[in-house]
Image (cartoon, rainbow, N blue to C red):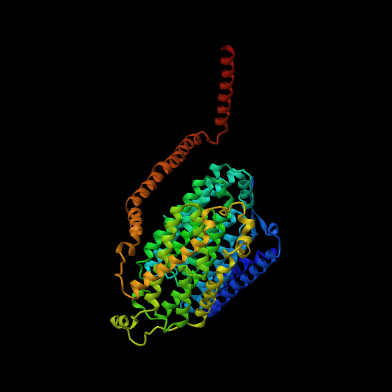
Amino acid sequence: MLDLVWLVPALPLAGFLLIVLFGRKLGEPGAGILATVMTAASFVVVVGIYFDLLSRTAEERHHVVTLFSWLPVGALQVDLALLADPLSITMALFITGIGSMIHLYAIGYMHGDPKFPKFFMYLNLFVFSMLMLVLGENLLVTFLGWEGVGACSYFLISFWHTRDSAATAGKKAFVTNRVGDWGMLVAMFLAFSAVGTLSYAGINHAAETGGIAAVTATGIALMLFVGACGKSAQLPLYLWLPDAMEGPTPVSALIHAATMVTSGVFLLTRMAPVLHASYPWAGDVIATVGALTALFAATIAVAQTDIKKVLAYSTVSQLGFMFLAIGSEAYVAAIFHMVTHAFFKALLFLGSGSVIHGMHHEQDMRRMGALRKVMPITGFTFIIGWLAIAGVPPFAGFWSKDEILLYAFANNRLLWFIGVVSALLTAYYMTRQVIMVFFGQARWNDHAEENGAHGDHSPHESPWTMVTPLVVLAGLSIVGGAMQLPFSKGTKFLEHWLEPVVHHSERNISGTWAYQNKWLLLALAIAIAITGIATSIAVYSKGKFKVIEPAILADAWRYDSAVSSLIGGPGYKSFDAVASFDAVVVDGVVNGAGTEVRRISGVLSKLQTGFIRSYAAIVAFGAIAVLAWFLVRGVL
């Protein structure tokens, strides 16, 4: 099966090409069914590869399939090669598995859209690009997928481009990610100049054996982190992700849960030996940015009223937890939370889409309430996702978040405390969302009358194509934590599975106070989740405390508007000045040199008369000049 790893990205690519050629003939739902089948087939191949790897020893779980030589240029030898190992296959499993469910969901959600085939064409291209990103054997193949998901995110976020807000959101995502791309490119240049290869195996081996100086490793690590901040929405480059809600809800689930936003976490885990070889403060930078991002986004989520915006800022916050783990050298915990987050956040986003569908495209939570009675499947599954992300045992999110906080405590107590506060706010704002949407009084009829709506606008349950993925994801959100339980070495399956990839870099905390008292920290994590939930119920359900939702939090600390003012004001003038300098000075020098050469050439061209006598005279003059030179030189 390992030799068939090329089929994993090839199947979604084939789906994309078939829809490009025959999309109009396939129509609805044909294009959606084809795209779903191709992604599901890719998942089946990944499952086969997984079991093949599982049957091998840890040392044998590394297989490279070279398709062809891509860039044989001097010392730069880059193959278009795919790598099947525990990390890449873990990523591919939930990309294709959850991606298949999102495709199925989208068949129902996009029903009636005039651009139905084009939407699924973009979805298949996105899945292909994401698979190339995680399966790449070297940084350049990964960068191919990296740019592919960036382009596809632009297409999908701005899919309904006739809305100005959607077109603007797509452009913001594209431009913001270019900043991150710069960081990744610089990291690639540094790695090649230091090691002479872009292969992960070559770079990581050099880092493990001291072949990369600490200062170079630090430079590579920090530049990779800049790239990761762009793709995985960390401060200060997070601001594209909340606006990405302008895309259709399946896009939100695909980008924010299982795929694009996790690529930065994947890349840093893949390059873990380089991070380990860098100066210790590099990890502190990553952990600090992650913790601050988690807290920053969590404070914003407590005051949002759009059902998808709450989940968007929640995604930014949860990604912050993953970077807190990366900076604490807890790579297994980072991947663990990435996988569980893919389960419950895809569930929550698809659940929100089901609510929006049932509420006739209403997204304001203040106009909902009591939906669990009319949308029982959506309500039940959404509540499971809420318990998972809030950190309630035994749901998946509890185990993964607790492991991150355990390593954070062993690494830096201040960052651990920030993580604890963020976890408390997560339980608080997610409970707030569940109460506003599924409990309390039904408020949709009042607002329907206010808007002058006619006919029956009561909410309704979504079709089977939409609720089936919700049920599957709810089940995964319940049992997903079983892959890495803290009870003993035998219950830490994910740790054993990823050991060949991260064993040189993972921090050992077995002798620390945190590890020795992990059950105390576990109990504290449960108390934090219960406190957040109870406080939110007291505020939004019981009315015992006043609702506090400051306008500055609703406006995301005005960070987005401040950046817009900076770019549109001084930034615009600075860019204009740079453009003028380029046109006048840089282009002026180049154009001036060309003009001068042309003038001199014009003068010299006059000597080319076409008359033999003129040429003979020039030759004679030249011969006389040469003789004169030698005579004068001899006399001197």
Residue at the far bottom: name it.
455
> Relative to residue 23, is residue 134 depicted above or below?
above
Residue at (56, 77) in percent of width and height: 33
Residue at (53, 35) in percent of width and height: 608
> Is 292 on the left-hand or right-hand side of 550?
right
> Is 527 on the left-hand or right-hand side of 269?
left
Q: Is residue 307 visible?
A: no
Query: Residue 607's x, y, as percent?
Result: 51, 33
> Relative to residue 198, is residue 354 depicted above or below?
below
Of 433 and 264, the residue lying toward us:
433
Looking at the rendered image, the quarter that the C terminus falls into is top right
Looking at the rendered image, the quarter that the N terminus falls into is bottom right
Residue at (55, 47) in percent of width and height: 189
- Figure quadrant of residue 457: bottom left
> Relative to residue 393, is residue 378 depicted above or below?
below
Query: Residue 348's x, y, as percent?
Result: 46, 72
